[in-house]
């Protein structure tokens, strides 16, 4: 009975110790995978950034205001792009040669792999936001607010059809 309790306690302690230690070692063992995945996601994000920037430029030429969240997204993407270019410059230092043999710097390798894994999550989130901006076609949702601001400044803004329909149905409900 006491042995079973000790085994159960040891198993729980083992679970809590192995997972974090295994995760730390995975940064070393999965170094190449983390770096390649990060590079691929950066390229995908760059393509989305170019498309969004082109749409922003087109909207500005038409005189439309751009939503602040789109501008913030572009700023965030530019920052992560600068960080990634520095990252890939530092990545060259990981595999130094010593005595005609490749001798990786394990500390730098660990740091680069961990940063690549963490930054990949940020890039994936930015990529999702960028795809949302692109989803709306030529006049996506990100530019609608700017168009409404411009229309209201010219006195052309009126209630959208969805709100008109909703307000008429509410009037009909209250009339009954």
Image: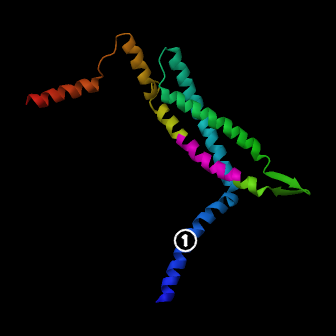
Residue 136's quadrant in the figure? top left
- The majority secondary structure of the magenta stretch comes to helix
Asked if residue 80 lies left or right of residue 94, the reply is left
Magenta-colored stretch includes residue 121:
yes
- The percent position of residue 63, horizontal first and vertical second, equals 49, 14
- The percent position of residue 157, horizontal first and vertical second, equals 33, 15
Magenta-colored stretch includes residue 89:
no
Front residue (pair 30, 1): 1
Q: Among all residues in the image, which is located at the extreme left?
A: 176
| Residue found 59% across the figure and 69% down from its top | 17
Front residue (pair 115, 34): 115
- The percent position of residue 163, horizontal first and vertical second, equals 26, 26
Q: Among all residues in the image, which is located at the extreme bottom?
A: 1
Image quadrant in which the C terminus is located: top left
Asked if residue 161 lies left or right of residue 5, the reply is left
Q: Please, is residue 98 above or below residue 19 in the view?
A: above
Mark 1 is surrounded, within 10 Å at the Cα level, by few (under 14), some (14 to 19) or many (20 or more) other residues, namely few
Query: Is label 1 in a helix, a strand or a loop?
Result: helix
- The residues colored magenta run 111-125
| Residue found 15% across the figure and 26% down from its top | 171
| Residue found 37% across the figure and 14% down from its top | 152
Q: Which residue is mark 1?
A: 15
Q: Please, is residue 42 above or below residue 140 in the view?
A: below
- The percent position of residue 158, horizontal first and vertical second, equals 30, 17
């Amino acid at each position: 009975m006491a042995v079973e309790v000790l085994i159960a306690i040891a198993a729980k302690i083992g679970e809590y110790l192995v997972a974090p230690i295994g995760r730390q070692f995975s940064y070393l063992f999965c170094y190449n995978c983390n770096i390649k995945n990060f590079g691929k996601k950066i390229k995908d994000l760059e393509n989305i950034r170019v498309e969004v920037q082109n749409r922003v430029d087109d909207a500005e030429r038409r005189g439309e205001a751009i939503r602040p969240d789109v501008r913030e997204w572009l700023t965030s993407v530019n920052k992560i792009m600068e960080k990634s270019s520095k990252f890939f410059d530092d990545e060259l230092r990981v595999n130094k040669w010593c005595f005609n043999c490749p001798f990786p710097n394990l500390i730098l390798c660990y740091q680069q792999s961990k940063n690549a894994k963490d930054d990949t999550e940020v890039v994936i989130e930015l990529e999702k936001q960028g795809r949302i901006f692109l989803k709306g076609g030529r006049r996506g949702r990100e530019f609608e607010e700017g168009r409404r601001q411009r229309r209201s400044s010219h006195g052309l803004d009126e209630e959208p059809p969805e709100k008109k329909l909703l307000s008429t149905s509410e009037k009909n409900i209250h009339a009954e």
